[in-house]
Amino acid sequence: MSKIDNTDKTTPEFFIPINALDDIKTRKQLSPSGFRLFTGFCNCWGFNKNQRLALLDDVHPQTYRKWERISLLLGIHKDLKILFADHDSARRWFFSVSHDVPFGGISPFDYLFQGNKNNLYGDLSYLDAWIEMK
């Protein structure tokens, strides 16, 4: 990532110089964060799928679906790291049978493969709600 000069205190810490995006390594590092930001923005404003694709300069719908799924999986991973003190505990919960809604007697892992991306949303929503209760 390009070195950011923070000696000027008028420049916010999150500032990224425009020429930083010329560097392929920087773009790769910023891509996941950028997509999460984009998704959050679109969710907040209620943009539908076609509007999102148009904003991304008509990226192929299949590519967008893959990005969306990756973003949901990253969210699930992040939530598991917040909720559990160690990886083994997170794995134990993720692969154990749960009778909670939405899982209905299968593991959260198996639930991911029982349907479509709505199941990814289901896992993530469940974990987000769990975090909110803590």
Image: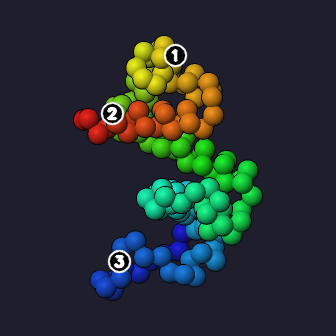
The residue at the point 52 percent across, 16 percent down is 106
**Which residue is labeled 3 in the image?**
12
Q: Where residue 130 is drawn, which disc sits there?
A: 2
Marks 2, 3: nearer the viewer? 2
Task: Give SS at disc 1.
Answer: loop
State the CA–CA distance, disc 1 to disc 2. 18 Å
In the image as oriented, which residue stretches furthest toward the left?
A: 134
Amino acid at circle 1: Ile
For the residue carrying disc 2, how many other residues have a C-alpha within 10 Å: few (<14), some (14-19), or many (20+)?
few
Sooner in the amino-acid sequence: mark 1 or mark 2: 1
Kindly indicate whether the residue at mark 2 contacts the one at mark 1 (C-beta within 8 angstroms): no
Task: Give SS at disc 3.
Answer: loop
**Percent of width and height locating residue 97:** 47, 14
Quarter of the image for residue 28 reads bottom right
Marks 3, 1: nearer the viewer? 1
Kindly indicate whether the residue at mark 1 contacts the one at mark 3 (C-beta within 8 angstroms): no
Quarter of the image for residue 130 reads top left
Kindly indicate whether the residue at mark 3 contacts the one at mark 2 (C-beta within 8 angstroms): no
Residue 122 appears in the figure? yes
Q: Nearer the viewer, residue 84 or 3?
A: 84
Amino acid at circle 3: Pro
Residue 28 appears in the figure? no
Quadrant for the C terminus in the image: top left
**Percent of width and height locating residue 61:** 72, 54
Q: Where residue 106 is drawn, which disc sits there?
A: 1
**Percent of width and height locating residue 93:** 43, 22
Q: Nearer the viewer, residue 10 or 41?
A: 41
Q: Nearer the viewer, residue 45 or 76?
A: 45
Indicate left or right for 69 with 90 as reference: right
